[in-house]
Amino acid sequence: MMTNENKLETAKLVILFWAELAIELLLGFIFGRLENAGIVIPTYLHVFILDICLLIPVFAYTIKKGDSIVEAFEFKKIKVSTFFFTILLVIVAQPMVMLANVVSQFFVPNVMVQAVDQFATESVGLTLLATVISAPITEEIVCRGFFTNRLKKVFPFAVAAIFSGLMFGIIHLNLNQFCYATVLGIIFAYVNRASGSIFTSIEMHMVFNGTNMCLLFMMNAVMEAAGMDFAKVAEQSRAASSTLPTTAIVLAILSIPSFFLVRLVIRAIAKREGNLETK
């Protein structure tokens, strides 16, 4: 049974999450109005501004409570072996993440594919800096460093991981990214518990975003060279394709060993970081 103190803490965390969501929606509204007025804000600048705004509430709350920033957000060093095992974790988790992505596409388009043409017309370097460096750091500090670490003091860890994963999915504001971001968010929470450090989920997030962004840019370039619109071709294929169910079934089968491999890698990380007894 939750104590009054835990209930109060939970209520504050819920309010903070809604504040984060309100910030994102407000900025989206402002940028939309500016675009309607003929003032276009590049995607990378949108991301940089949003990241700064999202960090303010969680750092302000932590400082107000008098908590150590390093300890509260778990900014702790990881071993070299953990660094490489974390990259391996990104690889073995792919079937589960891809399954969530494919399932969402039964209902909605792939958001990143639809946006890649816009990314390509802006600064590729700054877009990669925003999506591969800035966004992962910010989102991990907010979702794992802040929400997971505080929720796990109130709820069992599995509940905290799921809640923070759902929060991570929700802040993407679309069904496509919500599905696979939620899966990733839960994995991120567990790998951080295994390592005792937020740097593992930041690394995973960066590798995941970096790999996908580079693939999108390369595929877009190939399509352009062939005189085709990548986003349009992808959406037409998705809408008319009869292969989505087959792809989903194959990925569902592959997700079974993927789940167990993810557990094994997380356990290996916990062992190397001396946290095995809690996993």
Image (cartoon, rainbow, N blue to C red):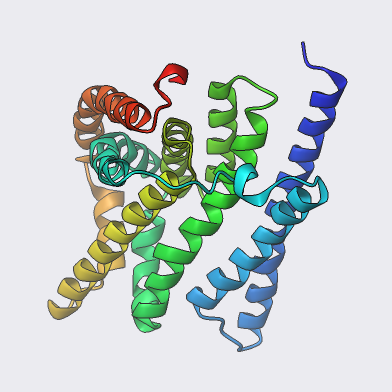
Q: Is residue 99 above or below residue 217?
A: above
Can you tell which quarter of the image residue 144 is in? top right
Nearer to us in this view, 277 or 158: 277
**Residue in the picture at 12% in, 76% down:** 226
Q: In this view, does 224 lie above or below 155?
A: below
Nearer to us in this view, 141 or 253: 141
Image quarter of the C terminus: top left
**Residue in the picture at 63% in, 67% down:** 52
Horizontal relation, residue 167 to residue 245: left or right: right
All told, the count of numbered labels is 0
Estimate the x, y position of residue 199 in percent, counting from the top left.
44, 49
Horizontal relation, residue 189 to residue 267: left or right: right
Estimate the x, y position of residue 107 in percent, counting from the top left.
42, 43
Q: In this view, does 245 lie above or below 203?
A: above
**Residue in the picture at 59% in, 32% down:** 163
Residue at the right extreme?
4
Can you tell which quarter of the image residue 12 is in? top right
Estimate the x, y position of residue 29 in percent, counting from the top left.
68, 68
Horizontal relation, residue 253 to residue 267: left or right: left
Image quarter of the N terminus: top right
Residue at the left extreme?
226
**Residue in the picture at 29% in, 47% down:** 80
Residue at the bottom extreme?
38
Res 273 visible: yes
Nearer to us in this view, 165 or 202: 202
Res 170 visible: no
Horizontal relation, residue 191 to residue 241: left or right: right
Estimate the x, y position of residue 101 in percent, counting from the top left.
35, 43
